Amino acid sequence: MLTVEKIGGTSMSALAEVISNIIYYERKDATLYNRVLVVSAFSGVTNLLLENKKTKEPGVYHHIANYRDFTDHSANLSEN
């Protein structure tokens, strides 16, 4: 199972706590994987991975979850 977890941009000022309490929290070995961590502080990343809030265009996660090719989607990086 693949999950998407969004971390708010202001949380990044407490990076050590983010790593301990979100990234590693009660996880080890294989449970650390099969996750996409989205940090909203990076311009356009949330739109690219999840959904563009303005156009409603589905992001990469939608394509992966539906077993569709997502490699062309990276071309939209310049539009964000």
Image (cartoon, grey):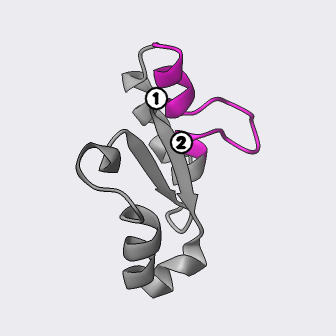
Q: Is 8 displayed left or right of 76 in the figure?
A: right
Name the residue beneath numbered marker 2.
48
Identify the residue shown where x is 45% and y is 34%.
2
Label 2: how many Cα within 10 Å (few below 14, some 14–19, many 20+) = many
Above or below: residue 69 compared with residue 1:
above
Q: Is residue 54 visible?
A: yes
Identify the residue shown where x is 41% and y is 35%.
74
Quadrant hosting residue 40:
bottom right
Identify the residue shown where x is 49% and y is 32%.
60
**Measured from the top left, where is residue 55 in percent x and y?**
74, 36
Quadrant hosting residue 24:
bottom left
Q: Amino acid at mark 1?
A: His
> In the rendered view of the protein, which quadrant contains the N terminus?
top left
Q: Are marks 1 and 2 in contact (CB under 8 Å)?
A: yes
Q: Amino acid at mark 2?
A: Leu
> Which of the labelled discs sits on residue 73, or is there none?
1
Region rendered in magenta: 47-67
> Which of the labelled discs sits on residue 59, or is there none?
none
